[in-house]
Amino acid sequence: MSTYKADRTRQYIYIALLCAQGVIIGLLERMIPFPFAFAPGAKLGLANLITIISLFTMSIPDSFILMCLRLLLTTLLGGTLSTFLYSGAGAVLSWFGMLLIKQLGEKRVSMIGISAAGCILHNVGQLLVASLIAQSWTVMLYLPVLAFMGILAGIAVGIAANFLFEHIDILRRLRYDRTKRRKKGATHENSSHVA
């Protein structure tokens, strides 16, 4: 019982650390001037770095909680309702998309591919909110330009995530533990079906 509490406490600390880093990246990203005036509060989605790390090192519910906390805290620390809507739509669509693409396996899609898809989906989510607010689908004409920027940002974020996983021992260990637990669960499930 005490081992479970210690593991859970360690997990909460890890969520809090990643959340703080995501908030800082989100606040720094907000300072970058965005070249398109169609959506005040829209962002490139560089904080997806934290989302990628969480998808590879945490359970799905913990990763979702981290994304929600990061979104809420970033909005409370200087955001507006429009930034919450744009960031929320982008973050949720990006998180679900990256989660689904990650299920294909690392042999089919690399971390850079997952990241690029996440950044494109982040921009799609923002454009959907912008078109709902403007009550016009003409905003979606920005999609090719934003998709190109999303691919570039996604590649940069994916390279950064790869670098972190290769050079930070604790991330590499957490990723390995997560993979090992998932395989162990699948083996246990298969053996119970055979029995």
Image: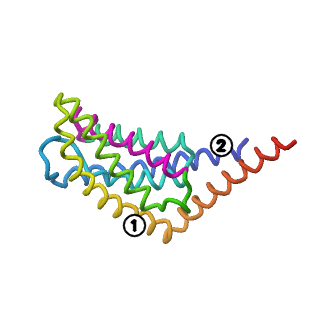
Q: Quadrant of the C terminus?
A: top right
Nearer the observer: mark 1 or 2; the answer is 1
Q: Quadrant of the N terminus?
A: top right
Q: 188 above or below 53?
A: above
Q: Which mark is residue 159?
A: 1
Report the side of 21 relative to 142 (left or right). right
Asked where in the image residue 90 lies, by quadrant, the reply is top left
Q: Is residue 76 highlighted in magenta?
A: no
Report x, y in % for residue 14. Answer: 51, 51
Q: Residue at x 59, y 63 (%)?
A: 173
The extreme bottom residue here reads 167
The extreme right residue here reads 195
The residues bearing labels 1 and 2 have C-alpha atoms spaced at a distance of 35 Å
Within 10 Å of disc 1 (Cα), the crowding (few <14, some 14-19, many 20+) is: some
Report the side of 47 relative to 63 (left or right). left
Report x, y in % for residue 160. Answer: 39, 65
Q: Main secondary structure of the magenta part?
A: helix
User: N-terminal of the two: label 1 or label 2?
Assistant: 2
Q: Which mark is residue 5?
A: 2
Query: Which span is picked out in magenta?
Result: 78-103
Report x, y in % for residue 191. Answer: 82, 46
Q: Is residue 99 highlighted in magenta?
A: yes
Q: 17 above or below 126?
A: below
- Secondary element at tag 1: helix
Asked where in the image residue 97 lies, by quadrant, the reply is top left
- Secondary element at tag 2: helix
Q: Amino acid at mark 1?
A: Ile
Q: Nearer the viewer, residue 120 or 81?
A: 120
Report the side of 4 relative to 91 (left or right). right
Report x, y in % for residue 53. Answer: 47, 55
